[in-house]
Amino acid sequence: GINDELAAHAWLSVGSLLSSESNREQEELSAYNKAIRLKPDYAEAYYNRGNLKNVLGQHDSAISDYDEAIRIKPDNPLSYNNRGVTKSFLGQFESAIADFDEVIRLKPDDAEAYAKRGIAKGDLGQYEAAIADFDEALRLNPEDTFVCATRGRAKGSLGQYEAAIADFDEAIRLNPDEAETYFIRGFAKMQLGQYEAAITDFDTGIQLVPDDVDAYYYRAAAKYELGQYETAIADSSVVIQLDPDFAEAYAIRGATKIHLNLILEAKADFQKALELAEQADNKSLITEIEELLQTLLGNGD
């Protein structure tokens, strides 16, 4: 009756208030449970409880709550959005895309929904479709650096490196302090053989984040291509210091040492790389290193 209805509203309010306080999750959960007991078709209570369950790491249970909220109120884009985000987190990308479709149907100018759907499509390897969604997201919100960089990544995955670099340029213009964008732009430039420009990007990124292992590794690779062997060795040694199990770093350091005629040291690096590659069962790297070792042994010590 009317009293149950009022009590249910009261418990929902209690839960909402508790959600802004730390370490009150169990009391908040209990408030939503009471609201739902008093009013079983209370979409908002299911929605809030779903959000709380996500915070508690109970993602499957959160999805069930969003299901209920949607069953009761099929026109609330927030429920579809949060269910889609949860499904994406669980790797259920097809199903997440269907939820973002609904968000977009209900809110055609929701830039974030296009972005989230694009990311899910990218996770399925549907890069063309992902790019179309990112285009729409950026049309609605041109200043979104994250979407701009993510569209660049999708273009890179299709081998469209020039177009990818244009997106990274724009993302960097909008947010010059994001190291990751310099790293991925540098990597794209390497694919085009622009090693000097790539090194400049890695330099900038490393200034912003001094312990990014991949950045040192790719900078070493770029320096190797340019014949800058001493500094390439220095970079690969930093990688090994930061991550002693990085097989490729030993391999590239070994390859670089051959050019400086440090044959015994090169051999030791290749053997270490081979040992790590075998532990990781990295077949392509194993083959590569074995070939390099053959070449070395063929040249004697």
Image (cartoon, helix red, strand yellow):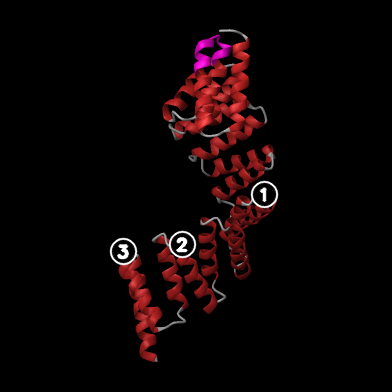
Q: In which quarter of the image is the N terminus?
A: bottom left
As rendered, which of 282 and 126 lies closer to the eye? Answer: 282
**Quadrant occupied by the C terminus:** top right
Instruction: Determine whether 238 is above or below 267 in the image.
Output: below
Separation (CA) of disc 2 from disc 3: 21 Å
Q: Name the residue under label 1.
A: 127
Q: Which residue was labeled with disc 2?
A: 59
Q: What amino acid does circle 1 point to? A: Tyr
- N-term-proximal mark, 1 vs 2: 2
Going by the numbered disc 3, the residue's amino acid type is: Glu
Which amino acid type is shown beneath numbered disc 2?
A: His
Element type where label 1 sits in the image:
helix
Badge 3 is on which residue? 21
* Residue 213 at x, y percent in the picture: 47, 32
Which segment is the magenta one? 257-268
Q: Which of marks 3 and 1 is in front?
A: 1
Whether the magenta-drawn stretch holds residue 267 is answered as: yes
* Crowd class of label 1 (few under 14; some 14 to 19; many from 20; radius 10 Å): many
Whether residue 226 is visible to the viewer of this picture, yes or no, is no
- Earlier-in-chain disc, 2 versus 3: 3
Q: Position of residue 55 (x, y in %)?
A: 40, 61
Residue pictured at 45% horizontal, 35% vertical: 208
Comes first in the chain, label 3 or label 1: 3
| Foreground of the two, 170 or 275 | 275
Quadrant for residue 31, please give it: bottom left
Task: Tell me where residue 84 sits by quadrant.
Answer: bottom right
Element marked by disc 2: helix
Circles 3 and 1: CB atoms closer than 8 Å:
no
Q: Quadrant of residue 52?
A: bottom left
